[in-house]
Image (spheres, helix red, strand yellow):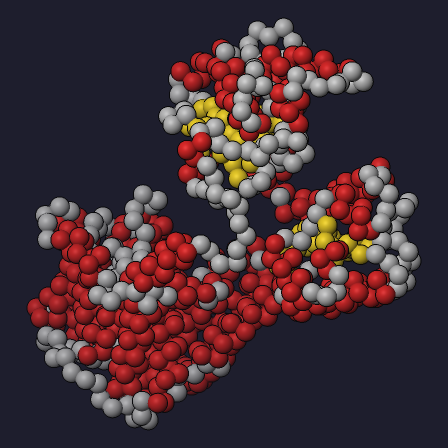
Amino acid sequence: MPESPRPIDSSSTSPSPTISILPPAPVMKRNAMRTLRGVRSDLGVRSLLPEWRAMLSRHGLREDLIAGLTVACIALPLSLAIALASDVPPAVGLTTAIIAGIAVALFGGQQLGVSGPAAAMAVLLGQIVDTHGLGGLLFVGLGCGLLQIATGTLGIGRVMRLVPLSVVHGFTAGIGVLILVGQLPRALGLPSPDESHVLDVVSHIAEYLTHANPIAVAISGSVVLGMVLVPRRWPKIPTALIAVAIPTAIVTATGADVPLLGEIPRGLPAPSLPDWPRHGVLALVGDVFVVYALASLESLLSASAVDKLRGPGAPSHDADQELVGQGIGNVAVSLFGGIPVTSVIARSALNVQSGARTRRAAIIHALALIACVYLVPDLVASMPIAALAGVLLATGIRMLDTKYLRELWHAARVEAVVFLVTVFTMVAFDLLVGVQAGLIAALVVAVLRLSRVRGELHPAHDGTPHHMGFSGPLTFLTTTRIDELRGELAGLDAQHGLVLDLRHVDSIDASAASSVIELATAWRARGGRVALLGPNAEVERRLLAIGEDGGVRESIAYVEEELDKVIGRRSRSPENAHQRLTRGVERFRDQVRGQLSPLLDRLAVGQAPHTLFLTCADSRVNPSLITGSQPGELFVVRNIGALLPPAGSETLNDEGAALEYAVRVLGVRNVVVCGHSKCGAMTALREGGGKLGDLPALAHWAKGASVIAGDLAAAPTLTDATQACSVRQLEHLRSYPVVAQALATGELRIQAWYYDMDTADVLEWDPDVKRYVPVGGRDDTR
């Protein structure tokens, strides 16, 4: 019998494998410390100090100044327009942009984000103002900010990303529709309707259309065309400001009769607590949570978009710190009489594209807006309302995101339906109803997908047992399918064994486990035998917990010999082996081939593997399994013992031919020689070849292999012999000119690996320390 494997260097012994439900104590301690570190008791100030110091340096000042002023040109008209859409005075929009621009820039989780009033929130905020007054909206902003601070401080900001993107995009598109309809009266120069519902607005426009102001129509139309068309050619131009400035100048010069924005206060209001809402604070609880969820999600989506714009080398945003910053911003804005804010994608993207370097750019944008409030309030007051309505109309058009809907319709039609359900219910009923309907639709889709389990029954054939295969997660939603298969079994002969193939089941809950055990119990009651083939660790634990007294443990089989014993069939039958292969091919056709079709299509053209993997022919060594590689990644060469003759060997050198082809023709960048524990080839060579007289081909192999492997008998243990043999193959590799040349130019790497079957872990030879160490530096022994 081969000896138990151990490392070559006795100083590096591996721990005995253990099985435990709980992680080791040191791991639990590290996890606990990591959780405690996730709580931002100081609101993240210590982590932000280096970035605050960077704002005080002159490095990047010019770039920040240009970017900040550019963003301010966009923020000025947008903040005024969004305030109008939110049914609050225009000056409130400027106050909001200024306070949020400074507070969130200082405390947020992204360096180059710009926060302020967002068009996506305007309609919702307008409804809150209509119902609860401005005081109610300020309370909502205050509550939203406190929730965001709590969420970010506790380190659970990533939970906000659980809302499906189809619902998020549907909500944004629905807001776009509502903005388009809601701003049409202002764009036409008509008085605003008494009610804000879409049907009421449309009815109002139809009634007063003959009273439309042609000048207002021309102004709003030109602003829309300018904001839609100009950025396609010149994306860095502050289109919104120019689109509003030109009609403002024309109206001021000509004295045209159109409604103007009107006087705005000089300076910022003093901070104060908001007025008590009309219907009390409790009536605002639902609105607080809706605004909190939407504002947080919008901010995190914006931060992710900015990360993509900055490229892979730039630091990514901190989701929890971003929520802390947004929360501080919303609390501060509410105290100054502003409306809830988010990180805004358009302004943040422009900040990045304009060359911003630090958080200073967002603060400069806020200071520029302050200058407008103090220095040119009369100019701001002379802006035509129709021009601002045009800005909102253009914003609403962009929010419709028809391109995303078309792509979603072609890629995932069910997700597109969720998108449309969200939009329709928002427009037809209410914002909150729309979000709820979208979430319900998304949950229904998820439930249907979870319930879609593949379960197939193949009756016995030519002496083979009945075979019932499952794949995917088995949950309470799949018990109906299991019951259907149980009904199909009723008409089959129970004298044949039944194999319940669980190798491709990802997970199983108590209901599904109970159904599987009931199916097996019913089959046994009819006199048949049942085998539960290949459940993973989680599935096995659940089955054992549910069916502790139902013979489950005795029914589980993982290898062919165990399966034969459980089913009671003739061991190692050719028919059984053929059936296993046939089932595998059928599964490949039905389930795998379609999922991997893009990869398989490319591999049909040619191969470009990155690694030549030389290993033993032992069936227990699966290169793709232990390396997690896909088809096309490994050029696998297998033989008895994972041996490579040196260059110039007189023996027929198939391995050398494959090596030269892989390195020179295929251009592999890595060569791995992988031995393994309990190797029969190494055992035979170590014992001098053994008695192989009745196996002449194997005896001939042993003569040549003993020369290639070296003196294995001198090694203390089989493990030492196998590991030393793999290292010896590295010398053989270097003897090939193609390998020596590639090593000299740094185009190739060669490695010796060792697969330990007892721990199911992979070690590699480290020439610096002269011993085998875990691949990747982690010891994952069980």
Task: State whether residue 486 appears in this view.
Answer: yes
Task: State whether residue 245 appears in this view.
Answer: no
Q: Residue at x 22, y 72 (%)?
A: 96
| View extreme (left): residue | 375
Number of labels in the image equals 0
Residue nearer the viewer, 384 or 108: 108
- Point out residue 232 in the picture as x, y percentages from the top left corner: 35, 51
- The image quadrant of residue 120 is bottom left
Which quadrant of the figure contains the N terminus?
top right
| View extreme (bottom): residue | 279
Image vertical order of residue 207 relative to residue 564, above or below: below
- The image quadrant of residue 628 is top right
Residue nearer the viewer, 237 or 626: 626
- Point out residue 219 in the picture as x, y percentages from the top left corner: 29, 68
Please give left or right for residue 555 compared with residue 117 in the image: right
Residue nearer the viewer, 662 or 6: 6
- The image quadrant of residue 640 is top right
Image vertical order of residue 523 relative to residue 313, above or below: below
